[in-house]
Amino acid sequence: MTGKLDLDPVLVARARELARRAGQPVVDLARSHTTVSVERAVLRLAGVSGADPDGIPWVNRLVDAVAADVGLGHGVAVPVFDALAREGGTDVTLLAQKAAAGSVRFTQPTGRAATAARSAARRAVGAGIRRIDRRRAERDRLIKRHGDPKQRPWIYLIVATGDIYEDIPQAQAAARAGADVIAVIRSTGQSLLDYVPEGATREGFAGTYATQENFRLMRAALDESSKELGRYVRLTNYASGLCMPEMATLAGLERLDMMLNDSMYGILFRDINPVRTFVDQRFSRQVHARAGIIINTGEDNYLTTADAVDEAHTVTVSQLLNEFFAHEAGLADWQLGLGHAFEINPEVPESFRLELAHALLARELFPDAPLKWMPPTKHMTGDVFRGNLLDGFFNLAGALTGQGILLVGMMTEAVVTPWLSDRDIALQNVRYVLGAAGGLHEDFVPAPGGFIRRRANQVLGEALDLLERIGEQTLLTAIAEGTFGIMKRPADRGKGLDGVAAHEADYCNPATDILEAAA
Amino acid sequence: MSERSERTGQHSSPALTPPARSGGGVSKQIVRPYGDTTGDGMVQVSFTLPVAHDKRAEGAAVQLANKMGIDPAMVVHAKPMGDGFTFFVVYGRVNHLVDLDAVQVVERDFALLSAKDVNTVIKQRLRRKLSVVGACIGTDAHTVGIDAILNVKGIAGEKGLEYYRELKVTNMGAQVSVPELVETARAEKADAVLVSQVVTQRDAHLHNTREMSAAFREAMPAGRRPLLIVGGPRFDETMTDELGVDRIFGRGTTPGEVASYLVHALITQRKAMA
């Protein structure tokens, strides 16, 4: 903390302690369960790739086959590598194809066969993790060669045509126009697919499917742009929804740089089962930690459903929980793009001062995290002129409070998917504000006892009250009872629950073993 | 064509066509866009042309504006964007007239309500939560449509029906069989059933919808049947009778429209008829 808000360090420490207390039971739950997507991610690291003629990935077919024979609770790695040894092969994808055809039976081996299968699985998965390590080292080299953006915040821009081959020139044009981070929005509803589509894709619904091949194509294109522009252009996608662990793994393998990865978004907004989400999330964050990926959390979403003034403290609470879960999974502060947003109704008196209070509160609470600052969406109308003004104030708030990552707001939000000219006008807006006032955070110290300091301390107080209440129940009960947003999400309901299994005594996940040994 | 390009704002004095408001009711109401003088016809437009910025590009912008009926056209701003694109802002006088009597609008047969108003009407007039059951039936695995309408996440910046406090939403997801749907509708005491159909191979969406409505007719007496609503990108919104449903929603329908319709059909209209 820099002391700009005069926050009481005792209260801040108390808030972190309460977040830990609320989060720990969830971590214990995550450590004692696995999911189909965690197991599929392990197989991807072990080298299973490709899909059957219907487009169902071989990892899905293999996990389903193992689960049918021995259940999920032992982990699939040992039964798979035991079967591979019995079949006398080395190709796990071939084994998946045979399993899908029904010609392989799986058992949970014991004794020497179990020991042999464990070490074979660990070798194969270890090779996958070393590939992620190499991609991380490659990123470090490229950043050294091309350099980071000259300014903070980094300028984050969204591309989404549905066609990866259309996205690529748009992303490169955006980078040329000043974007430091390109996010490729996913097709609507991908988060609810319980498999990762394969190959380069040319059609999507209001977005482009996240696939390993699409990741590779876009990263290669942005490597060209980085070289041309003399700064490393980062690439973002989404580790959320039912395939969170696999998305994180593919991102690590293809050197994506940032991933959307919130602890509760899928539960609240997509009705994904809470246990499924927390188990998947922990694994995905362990992979992100290893891959040097910056996560972006989704607190902005709360403010699109709830009132941005009344519910400001739920953002703080969620940021503290996201921080706890992230640290527990091995992520460092520089990897925490904690989210927040400029969503207060502009008709509210002093709305800009309230925004500054909230934005500075996040900055002071998480001084070493590259906060992700999200533009207005809820109060954007078809009035593009007013929208452009609002985006200007959003940019100014970002500069004044030293935000790390600025998602560029579009004046045509809620009108059309951004046109070429909308992006150009939006970037011009950002450039003007950062050019004219980029260093203003140095001078911006709210007056002691003034409106902004009082408001920030009030929000922190309300966050503490909420954390105390959660502590008296547990986080899962709080989610079940609708504490966040207005959605009630009981732990025994929601999508993807049938893909969750409790660990058996002999559960083995070589990926988790390797990732936790390093942490 | 550049002789028509005027950057100075001069234009001949417009033919004044004041809106006729005389009491007879027979005179036509003609209006023109308003800049700062009645009848001046002034408009502003902005657009991008896929050409690099030079004299010719500005001339091209004027040509487009002229073809849009803007004459004279003033290119007040031209800015290169990326490789081979130029953004223009054009002001000018449009020579079209608007005949207010000839305006035709298709009125929605129900009022579009805000989420707050939907909740208020349900709370005050139904005095319990309105129960909605949604599903993709048949082999259709595309939950995009039903999720856009039901999930809190919603679509195009509008929250889904789950967001409405006074709606109790049961989203059964994909590949739901018709008997399962009927059973769930009964268990949840559904006021409305929403079915989404994206796949249209061999008219699957039509067959499935007919099967669904027939099953509800068979299982429940007319007065007790939930409102049957079907949606999808390839439906003809006029086919309700043929398919045996109460309403069809096509491409681009938002959760707010569906919620407003539910209130209209189940509360406002029903009370009005009673």
Image (spheres, coloured by chain):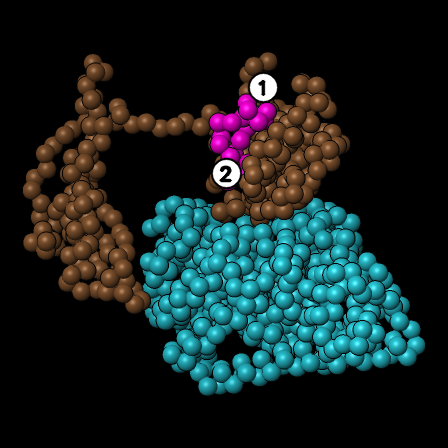
Q: Chain of mark 2?
A: B
From the rendered image, report the letter of the chain displayed in brown: B
Q: Which residue is at a point 52% across and 64% down the rendered structure image? A: A200
Q: Is residue A106 left or right of residue B56?
A: right
Near-viewer residue (A302 or A516): A516
User: Start and end of the magenta stretch?
Assistant: B231-249
The three-letter amino acid code for the residue at tag 2 is Arg
Residue carrying label 1: B270
Q: Colour of chain A?
A: cyan
Q: Which residue is at a point 40% across and 69% down the rendered structure image? A: A172
Residue carrying label 2: B234
Rate crowding at label 2 as few (under 14), some (14 to 19) or many (20 or more) other CA atoms within 10 Å.
some
Indicate the quadrant where residue A33 lies: bottom right
Q: Is residue A285 left or right of residue A344?
A: right
The three-letter amino acid code for the residue at tag 1 is Arg
Q: Which residue is at a point 20% across and 38% down the rendered structure image? A: B34
The percent position of residue B258, horizontal first and vertical second, equals 54, 34
Q: Mark yes or no: residue A93 visible.
A: yes
Q: Which residue is at a point 70% across and 19% down the rendered structure image? A: B221
Instruction: Tell me, yes or no, whether the two marked residues, 2 and 1, touch with CB atoms within 8 Å.
Output: no
The percent position of residue B131, horizontal first and vertical second, equals 67, 32
The percent position of residue B18, horizontal first and vertical second, equals 16, 28
The percent position of residue A393, horizontal first and vertical second, equals 40, 58
- Figure quadrant of the C terminus of chain B: top right
| Placement of A355 over or under A444, stated as above or below | above
